[in-house]
Image (spheres, helix red, strand yellow):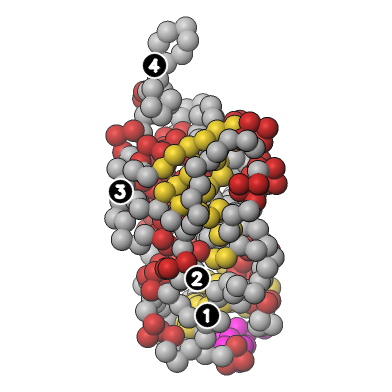
Amino acid sequence: MSELGPPRCFQCFRPQAQCYCDLIPRIQNETEIVLVQHVSERDHPFNTARMVRASLDRTKLVCGNSERLVNLDLGLVGSAGLLYPSKTAKTLANVPKNERPTQLVVIDGTWPQAKALVRDLPQLRDLPHYQLLPTEPGNYRIRLEPNEVSLSTLEAVVEALRELEPELTDLEKLVKAFETMVQRQLDHPKVFPSHYSGGKKSGRNLNIPASLITPDNSIVVAYGEMDCLVETETVEKSKVQRGPLVWSAHRLGGSFDSDLENFESFLQPRLQLKDTFLTHLGLSHQHFANGESLSEFRDRWGEFLQDGDTLVVYHPNGIRMLKHVNAKLAKWITLKSINFNGQVKRRTFGEFVKDECTNFDVKLPHSGRAGRRLAKAVSMVNYLRDVGLKNSEAESS
């Protein structure tokens, strides 16, 4: 190692021991991606626009601040669009194929920087705006994000191309390269969990709620998929309240396949569901052929959830969905509020379940992605109950 530090790769600018270039696939996309990068992002060591540019055949990058870019020709075509969740943005998944942009502009920068660029650059401000509809948090765990559904530049580009060009087969390889870069950085010996998103929750002590480990408590674990965002909703998507499209739940302590201990509902969607979205959910049109109305869902859910139950969901969005449709609520806990990462190595929820909860695996009769995630949540709750009970016994002995 020289006095200037470890040798670096001249493509990704990471130390050669952490180079990810050999993992990046070449993707022959048709929709040109134009990355408008704020100058402060150019030299950031974890910038993901660099990965996008190295992977996509049809992409270009322009870099600067508002003062430099305001008079620069960005080379935009008549069918260009901007990926930006403004009040007028259309959800990309709902745009007919013949109206979709052939050139998509993606801003690479923090949220305040993105707002400033759109405000100051007429070329961007005057474009039609499009938005994504992420159903889960991004995986950019080495940089803070403004809210639960924020995505990195790379994740946003991948989600957009999944809608615009679902036939592209190597997008998952690009995501895998991104996740490898994130994990290698988190595994670095000088990295500590408190540096990253999670803030005060990143300590090493498990904060298991007492209601989870009280033996007599009746616990219901639930997971829901949000209903579609309709075009008439003009507020920012992160602020739009939506009810459930799919709602799955399991009561702990009962039979895994009993109808009395399991709840599943497919509700009538507000918009026609696209094949790409259904594939993402692991479902088919048949699941919604006889979809329940909101009143039918409320009645059945009200019968399933008992007054003394403790409801456990992964994310606060699960509670918001029930509140939005005035469905029954019990006292509730979110798994996201529990610091299950007790080790120095940071892991996602799925990684933690795979690593730590194999002894608590369950097979549930629920369908699609909601069913798989519900099973993981049940495994996690069983694990936390086991750990909590053992800790309580050790403290009392």
Q: What element carries label 3?
A: loop
- Of callouts 4 and 3, the N-terminal one: 4
- Residue 8, percent from left and from top: 40, 20
Residue 97 appears in the picture as rendered: yes
Calculate the distance from the C-alpha at mark 4 to the C-alpha at mark 3: 31 Å
Tell which tag, 1 or 3, sits nearer the viewer: 3
Q: Which mark is residue 94?
A: 2
Tell which tag, 1 or 4, sits nearer the viewer: 1
- Of callouts 4 and 2, the N-terminal one: 4
Calculate the distance from the C-alpha at mark 4 to the C-alpha at mark 2: 47 Å
- Dot 2 alpha-carbon crowd within 10 angstroms: few under 14, some 14 to 19, many 20 or more: some
- Of callouts 1 and 3, the N-terminal one: 3
- Dot 4 alpha-carbon crowd within 10 angstroms: few under 14, some 14 to 19, many 20 or more: few
Residue in the picture at 62% in, 92% down: 295
Q: Name the residue under label 3.
A: 28
Calculate the distance from the C-alpha at mark 3 to the C-alpha at mark 2: 24 Å
Q: Name the residue under label 4.
A: 7
What amino acid type is highlighted by mark number 1?
Leu
- Residue 320, percent from left and from top: 66, 71
Tell which tag, 4 or 3, sits nearer the viewer: 3
Q: Name the residue under label 1.
A: 271
What amino acid type is highlighted by mark number 2?
Asn
The answer to whether mark 3 and mark 2 are in CB contact below 8 A is no
Highlighted magenta segment, given as a residue range: 297-308
Q: What element carries label 4?
A: loop
- Of callouts 1 and 2, the N-terminal one: 2
Residue in the picture at 51% in, 47% down: 76
Q: Is mark 2 on a helix, strand or loop?
A: helix
